[in-house]
Amino acid sequence: MIKRLFSQDDQIDFAKLSGDYNPVHLDPLKARRTCFGQPVVHGVHVLLWALDNLVSENLDYSKLTSLKTSFNRFIGVGEIVQFFLKNKDETCAEIQLLSGNEQVARIMVTYSSLLSEKFLNFPNEHPNRTQCLDRSAQQLSKVSGFLDLCLSQREAALLFPNLMRVFPSSQLAELIALTRLVGMECPGLHSIFSDLNLNFSKQSNDPAKLNYKVFSYDPRIRLLTQTVKSPGMMGTVRAFLRSPSQHQESYLELSKGVRKGEFLGQTALIIGGSRGLGEVTGKLLAAGGARVVISYFLGSEEAHSIVKEIKQGGGDAICLPFDVLSPNHLRKEDFENGWVLTHLYYFATPMISLGSKHSFSASLFQKFCDYYVSGFFNSFQTLKRLESELQGIFYPSTIAVSDHPSNMAEYVAAKSSGEAICDLLRKDNPSMNIYSPRLPQTTTDQMAFFLPVHKKDPAPLMLENLRRFSDKNNIDSGPSS
């Protein structure tokens, strides 16, 4: 079995070779604000790695004649990808790429013996770094243009030694240009490479350019189709236009809907408060008079910005780093002016990855449980150790526990286990208000999937639930939708 883990250094090397510097591949902080929640591997990088494996034992000179590839799911940096050669003969092959038991890409390729013919001349260099274009659906509808073809043959030989030995380097230059097209130009910043369908022919005398033109755009699923043509290749490339990062309302805007002093007396630790529902919750609580401690794991800059915004608006807030997978590092001294915590709001979450419809991934379930079960319980135990005066715990569950989406079994099972922990804590702490509402999808980064699905505005939703939670009669608060 051939397998590989793509590292962040691999990302940097491929970006230099291809010119695709889209931040979703290279910037962990910007990538976490996308629907992926983390940096993802270039689809064309994975494709070329698979083709490099395919020809690793073939020393005969060949050329590509056609290539069809579908990218079924994103591959996160640090994720292990497995290569399976399903079929192969003298003229064609079928490749399947898996992560765990899930197919992440399918490749159909045909090739032939290399005939005596002229191949394209192009600059032996990597592309200049350009701006990653931020284009809306309206702007993309009539886009056309071209990219100059080039290839640093030395760098390409380091990354794909077998391909450079077997196939003409001009074909590699044409393929690599596609990731620059999708990731930097069209759609650009908010792209998700979906699939490609290409045919290769005898090189023409046309200039060494990749010409492209938008053919269609389907707003129902945000799918862009464009035609591509270069001296030795032509076909279609499709990409989704994903939703931009979600920015929550400002503290001043949110405070308009909050009654003065309605959360006074709370000293609240908001775990995972640097974005999404945690960010909204922190701002609403502070606007209502609570003292707010916003914790973060990666989002230091975002958390400090939220604290600054709250303080400028007259609220009281601090922030601190906190890892729910290693919560014992929290100390009393981390809290300002001897603040004693009274309430815990738990929004820590990994990337909400979808599972397969007809299987159950133990590893994905464990990843969710690390946050929603073990991380939650251990965070509670840490606060008890710090001699906090906890009066209430807010644990947001999900309406998916009731709806049972077929591709979210691992997520639903972990959240259900989190609800079970809440039940256990209620029995052990009968005077404590433990609230675990089943919330619907909201407009946050985690729910910014590229398909347009109706989602709730998080501000009124959270304010309603915060008021229920702060109701002194709201004891033994089990799941509610």
Image (tube, rainbow, N blue to C red):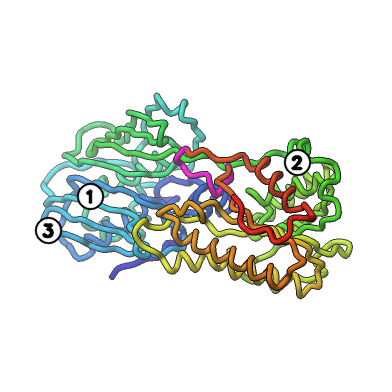
**Residue 173 falls in which quadrant of the image?**
top left
Among the two numbered marks 1 and 2 on one chain, the one whose residue lies closer to the N terminus: 1
Q: Which residue lies at the image location 71% right of the left edge and 52% below the top edge?
A: 303
Q: In the displayed image of the protein, which residue is found farthest to the right?
A: 337
Out of 18 and 135, give the one closest to the viewer: 135
Amino acid type indicated by mark 2? Tyr
Q: Which residue lies at the image location 17% right of the left edge and 62% below the top edge?
A: 59
Horizontal and vertical percent position of residue 155? 37, 55
Q: Is residue 411 above or below residue 207?
A: below
Out of 172 and 157, give the one closest to the viewer: 172
Instruction: Label 3: state its secondary structure.
Output: loop
Amino acid type indicated by mark 3? Asp
Graded by Cα atoms within 10 Å as few (under 14), some (14 to 19) or many (20 or more), the crowding at tag 1 reads some
* Label number found at residue 168: 1
Instruction: Label 2: state its secondary structure.
Output: helix
Among the two numbered marks 2 and 3 on one chain, the one whose residue lies closer to the N terminus: 3
Query: Magenta stretch?
Result: 443-452
Figure quadrant of the N terminus:
bottom left
397 with respect to 389 (left or right): left
Out of 115 and 333, give the one closest to the viewer: 333
State the separation of the CA atoms marked 2 and 3. 63 Å
Instruction: Label 1: state its secondary structure.
Output: loop
* Label number found at residue 89: 3
* Label number found at residue 251: 2
